[in-house]
Image (cartoon, helix red, strand yellow):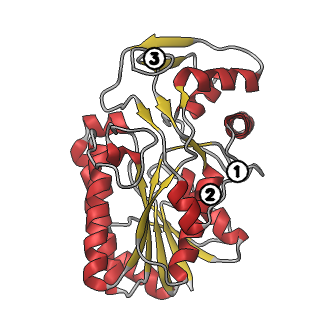
C-alpha cells in the first residue's frame, strides 16, 4: 500500500520520505515546489509536481499508487507572514486541506496524519502545555491550522476516516546522516538563521523582544529534532494501521530554551561569535511554548533519539556548511 506525502519536497516532509524509505515503505510525494526542492526527494520516491488542492490530480495519485494513508505537510508556516497575508494562509492551509480531505474521503483513504502546530494554543496559561489546553490561536497561521483540525475531526466522524493530528513545537536540526536539512534561503527558524549568521551567510541575527516574562527576557521554545518528528509520524502511522483510534498529540521534548540560550549554543558549536541585534517584539509571538509530551510517549511508544540542544544545533550547522559548499561549487 502506498503512502501519499504532501509537501514531501519541503523540510519536514523530505525527512518523512527518508523515514518511510528506510522502513521499506512506498511513499509518493506531491509538492508544488513553491518552497520545496526537487533534489530533496530521494530518487526511490516518485515526485509529482502539483498542488494538494487539485482534487482531480489527488484522486488520480491515490488510485494509481494504491494509497490508503496520507501524511499532510503541505502549507505555509511563517507566523509574521500570516499576520501580513491572512487570506493567503487560509487558502494554503485551510481551503486546500479541505479539498485534499474531500478527495481522500471520496477515494476511500483510511488514515490521515495532519501536520499541525503548537500555535493553535496561542498564549497558553500553563507550561508545559498539554493537548487538552484551551485552543486560542493568536495568529492567522495558528487559526488556519486549527480550522483544518476541526474539519478533519468532523470528516472523520461522518465518513469513518481515522486520523492523528500532530501539533509541532519548534522543529530544528537536520538528518544525522547528512541527507537533508532546512534548505530554504528565506527560512525564519531561529536555529537555521543563527547557523547562517555563524557561517557568514547572514550579516547578523535579529532578536525580537527582550522584555518577555522569561528568565532572560527572550521567548522560550521547545525545539524538536526533525528526525525525531519524522519518527513521531511513523509511530502515528503504526498506531492507525493497528486499528488505533483518532487522536491528537503534541510533538516536543517538554524542555524549553530561550532565544539567547539557543544563540549561545550555536556560538559554541561554531567556535566563534557573530553579530546579534536586539529589536522589538514581533506580532503573534507568545512568551513561552513548551510541550507536555507524555501523551505521545505513552500512547504511541514514541522515544526521541536526538533530544539534546547541542546535538540539534550541531546537525543544523553541519547541514548549513554542506549547503554553503554546494552553492559555492555551483
- Indicate the secondary structure of the residue bearing disc 2: helix
Which comes sooner in the sequence, label 1 or label 2? 2
Q: Position of residue 97 (x, y in %)?
A: 32, 64
Q: Looking at the image, which is closer to me, 235 or 294?
A: 294
| Distance (Cα) linking label 3 and label 2 | 33 Å
Q: Position of residue 206 (x, y in %)?
A: 49, 18
Q: Which mark is residue 175?
A: 1
Which comes sooner in the sequence, label 3 or label 2? 2
Q: Which residue is mark 2?
A: 15
Query: Among all residues in the image, which is located at the extreme left?
Result: 87
- Indicate the secondary structure of the residue bearing disc 3: loop
Q: Position of residue 4 (x, y in %)?
A: 50, 73
Q: Which residue is mark 3?
A: 217
* Residue 9 visible (yes or no): no
The answer to which quarter of the image holds residue 245 is bottom left
Dot 2, crowdedness within 10 Å: few (<14), some or many (≥20)? many
The answer to which quarter of the image holds residue 62 is bottom left
User: Which quadrant of the figure contains the C terminus?
Assistant: top right
| Distance (Cα) linking label 1 and label 3 | 31 Å
Whether tag 1 and tag 2 are in contact, CB under 8 A, the answer is yes
Amino acid at each position: 500500500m502506498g503512502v501519499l506525502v504532501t509537501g514531501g519536497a519541503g523540510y519536514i516532509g523530505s525527512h518523512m520520505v527518508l523515514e518511510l524509505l528506510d522502513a521499506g515503505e512506498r511513499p509518493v510525494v506531491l509538492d508544488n515546489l513553491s518552497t520545496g526542492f526537487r533534489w530533496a526527494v530521494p530518487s526511490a520516491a516518485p515526485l509529482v509536481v502539483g498542488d494538494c488542492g487539485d482534487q482531480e490530480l489527488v484522486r488520480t495519485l491515490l488510485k494509481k499508487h494504491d494509497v490508503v494513508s496520507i501524511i499532510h505537510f503541505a502549507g505555509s508556516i511563517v507566523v509574521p507572514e500570516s499576520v501580513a497575508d491572512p487570506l493567503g494562509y487560509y487558502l494554503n492551509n485551510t481551503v486546500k486541506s479541505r479539498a485534499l480531505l474531500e478527495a481522500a474521503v471520496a477515494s476511500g483513504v483510511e488514515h490521515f496524519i495532519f501536520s499541525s502546530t503548537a500555535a493553535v494554543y496561542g498564549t497558553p496559561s500553563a507550561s508545559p502545555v498539554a493537548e487538552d489546553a484551551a485552543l486560542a490561536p493568536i495568529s492567522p497561521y495558528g487559526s488556519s491550522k486549527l480550522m483544518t483540525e476541526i474539519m478533519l475531526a468532523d470528516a472523520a466522524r461522518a465518513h469513518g476516516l481515522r486520523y492523528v493530528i500532530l501539533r509541532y513545537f519548534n522543529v530544528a536540526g537536520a538528518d544525522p546522516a547528512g541527507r537533508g536539512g532546512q534548505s530554504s534561503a528565506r527560512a525564519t527558524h531561529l536555529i537555521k538563521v543563527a547557523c547562517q549568521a555563524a557561517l557568514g551567510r547572514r550579516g547578523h541575527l535579529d532578536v525580537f523582544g527582550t522584555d518577555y516574562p522569561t528568565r532572560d527576557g527572550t521567548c522560550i521554545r521547545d525545539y524538536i529534532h526533525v528526525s525525531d518528528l519524522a519518527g513521531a509520524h511513523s509511530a502515528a502511522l503504526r498506531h492507525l494501521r493497528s486499528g488505533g483510534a483518532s487522536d491528537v498529540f503534541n510533538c516536543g521534548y517538554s524542555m524549553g530554551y530561550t532565544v539567547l540560550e539557543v544563540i549561545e549554543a550555536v556560538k559554541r558549536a561554531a567556535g566563534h561569535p557573530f553579530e546579534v541585534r536586539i529589536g522589538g517584539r514581533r506580532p503573534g509571538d507568545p512568551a513561552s511554548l513548551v510541550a507536555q509530551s507524555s501523551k505521545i510517549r505513552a500512547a504511541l511508544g514514541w522515544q526521541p533519539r536526538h533530544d539534546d540542544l547541542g546535538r540539534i544545533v550541531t546537525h543544523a550547522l553541519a547541514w548549513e556548511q554542506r549547503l554553503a559548499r554546494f552553492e559555492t561549487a555551483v
